[in-house]
C-alpha cells in the first residue's frame, strides 16, 4: 500500500432532492465535497495511508469536515484551522437528461484566501509516493496559481509522483487563463486526467481529422507529444452501444498504448458528482499496487460507476467491493 497527499478545498454541499428546483426547495441535504478530498477518501477506502491538506475554519463546520474525513480514515494532521468561512456550494439535482446545476458560494473561504504555504513541505511530503492536486486549486486565486506550482515542485524534489486532474471549472476561471496556467504546471506532472475537451480547449491540440475514427487516441498522442514527461493520461467517455445513454467507459493512455475498460451501464444514476474523482482514485490505486494497465482502467471505471449509485461527492466503496462488482457481475457490464 502507498502513502498519498492530496491538497485542495473541501466545501459544504447543500443539495435539493431530485425533482426539486432550488427556488422551491424547503430543505437541503448536507454533504462535504471537494475534488482532492474525494480522491483522498477513495484511497483511504482502499487501505492507503492518505493525508488531506487544506484549511477550514475553527468553528463547528471545520470540526464537522474533520470528522467527515476521519470517518473514512483520512489523516487530518495537515488540515489547518483558521480563516473566516467554509466554502459552500448548492446543487440542484439533475434528472435524466436535465443535468445538475451548481451555485458556488466559496469566495473568501479559509482555503481560497490563503496567501502563503503554511505547511512544512519537508514534513508534508516525507515518504509520500503520490501528490495529487487538481485544476480547481489554481483556479481559486493568483496566489494559489503560484502556490500550486511551488507545492508540485517541492513534492517532485521529495521524490513523489505528481498526479494532476485538470478538472476545468468554467465558473471559476476563463479558458484562456486556465490554459495559460495549466500549461505551466503540466511539465511537472506524471499522471494526468485529461480528455478530448481539455486537449481541444485548454492544451491547444487541433481537432482530429474526419478520418480519425478513434479520436481519443489521436488526442492522447497529441497531448503526449506536447508533454512527453507525462507517463499516463486518463479520462472517461460516454459511448453508445445500446439505446441507453448512461454508459461509462474509462480510457487510459500509458506506455504509448491505449486501454479501454469494460462498459458499465448505470441505471438509475443517483448522483454524478465525484464520479471523476472516484475514477482518479481508482487509477491511483491501480498505479500504487502495480496493476497492469488493463486492470487499472477496469478497476477505476468500476469505482466510478459505483460512485454514481450513491448520494454525496465521495466514493464509499472498499477495494473488495469494487473488485467484486467488477468480477462477480453484480455490475451490469455490457462489453
Ligand atoms: O469533482 C467533484 C467536485 O467538483 C465537487 O466535489 C466540488 O470540488 C468541487 C468543486 O470545486 O466543484
Image (tube, grey):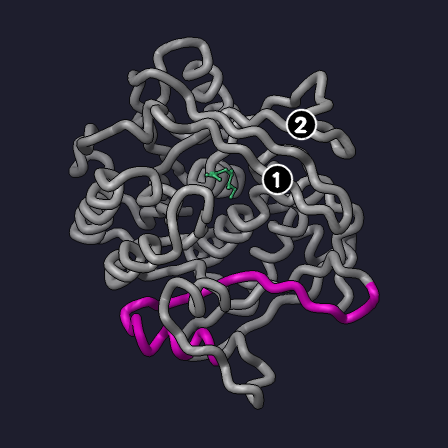
Label 1 crowding class (10 Å Cα cut-off): few <14, some 14-19, many 20+?
A: few
Judge whether residue 70 can be spotted in this image: yes
| Residue in the picture at 36% in, 70% down | 204
260 or 327: nearer the viewer: 260
SS at mark 2 in the image: helix
Judge whether residue 127 can be spotted in this image: no
246 or 170: nearer the viewer: 170
Would you name the residue on which mark 1 appears?
Answer: 101
Outermost residue toward the top in this view: 59
The image shows residue 132, relative to residue 252, as above or below, that is above
| Residue in the picture at 55% in, 47% down | 278
The image shows residue 2, relative to residue 59, as above or below, that is below
Proximity of marks 1 and 2: CB atoms separated by less than 8 Å? no
**N-term mark: 1 or 2:** 2
Q: x, y (%) of residue 76?
A: 37, 25
262 or 237: nearer the viewer: 237
| Residue in the picture at 25% in, 63% down | 187
Q: Quadrant of residue 81?
A: top left
Outermost residue toward the front in this view: 23
Q: x, y (%) of residue 33?
A: 51, 32
Residue 164 is covered by the magenta coloring:
no
Residue 238 is covered by the magenta coloring:
yes
| Residue in the picture at 45% in, 9% down | 60
Q: x, y (%) of residue 143?
A: 22, 38
Label 2 crowding class (10 Å Cα cut-off): few <14, some 14-19, many 20+?
A: some
The image shows residue 240, relative to residue 302, as above or below, that is below
Quarter of the picture holding the C terminus: bottom right
Q: Which residues are magenta?
A: 218-243
SS at mark 1 in the image: strand
Q: x, y (%) of residue 295?
A: 56, 64
Would you name the residue on which mark 2 appears?
Answer: 22
Mark 2 C-beta closer than 8 Å to ligand 1: no
Amino acid at each position: 500500500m502507498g502513502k498519498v497527499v492530496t491538497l485542495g478545498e473541501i466545501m459544504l454541499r447543500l443539495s435539493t432532492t431530485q425533482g426539486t428546483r432550488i427556488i422551491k426547495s424547503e430543505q437541503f441535504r448536507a454533504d462535504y465535497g471537494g475534488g482532492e478530498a474525494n480522491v483522498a477518501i477513495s484511497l483511504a477506502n482502499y487501505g492507503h495511508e492518505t493525508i488531506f491538506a487544506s484549511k477550514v475554519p475553527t468553528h463547528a463546520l471545520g470540526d464537522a469536515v474533520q470528522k467527515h474525513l476521519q470517518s473514512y480514515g483520512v489523516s487530518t494532521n495537515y488540515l489547518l484551522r483558521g480563516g473566516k468561512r467554509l466554502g459552500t456550494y448548492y446543487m440542484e439535482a439533475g434528472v435524466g437528461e436535465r443535468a445538475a446545476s451548481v451555485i458556488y458560494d466559496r469566495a473568501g473561504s479559509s482555503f481560497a484566501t490563503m496567501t502563503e504555504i503554511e505547511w512544512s513541505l519537508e514534513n508534508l511530503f516525507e515518504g509520500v509516493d503520490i501528490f495529487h492536486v487538481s485544476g480547481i486549486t489554481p483556479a481559486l486565486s493568483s496566489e494559489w496559481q503560484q502556490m500550486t506550482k511551488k507545492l508540485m515542485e517541492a513534492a517532485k524534489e521529495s521524490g513523489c509522483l505528481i498526479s494532476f486532474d485538470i478538472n476545468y471549472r468554467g465558473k471559476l476561471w476563463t479558458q484562456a487563463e486556465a490554459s495559460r496556467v495549466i500549461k505551466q504546471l503540466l511539465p511537472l506532472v506524471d499522471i494526468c486526467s485529461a480528455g478530448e475537451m481539455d486537449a481541444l480547449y485548454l492544451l491547444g491540440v487541433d481537432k482530429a481529422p474526419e478520418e480519425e475514427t478513434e479520436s481519443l487516441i489521436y488526442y492522447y498522442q497529441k497531448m503526449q507529444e506536447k508533454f512527453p514527461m507525462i507517463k499516463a493520461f486518463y479520462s472517461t467517455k460516454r459511448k453508445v452501444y445500446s439505446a441507453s445513454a448512461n454508459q461509462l467507459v474509462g480510457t487510459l493512455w500509458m506506455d504509448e498504448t491505449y486501454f479501454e475498460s469494460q462498459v458499465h451501464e448505470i441505471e438509475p444514476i443517483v448522483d454524478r458528482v465525484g464520479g471523476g474523482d472516484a475514477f482518479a482514485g481508482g487509477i491511483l490505486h491501480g498505479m500504487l499496487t502495480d496493476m497492469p494497465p488493463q486492470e487499472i482502467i477496469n478497476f477505476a471505471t468500476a469505482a466510478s460507476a459505483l460512485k454514481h449509485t450513491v448520494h454525496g461527492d465521495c466514493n464509499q466503496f472498499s477495494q473488495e467491493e469494487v473488485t467484486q462488482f467488477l468480477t462477480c457481475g453484480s455490475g451490469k457490464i455490457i462489453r
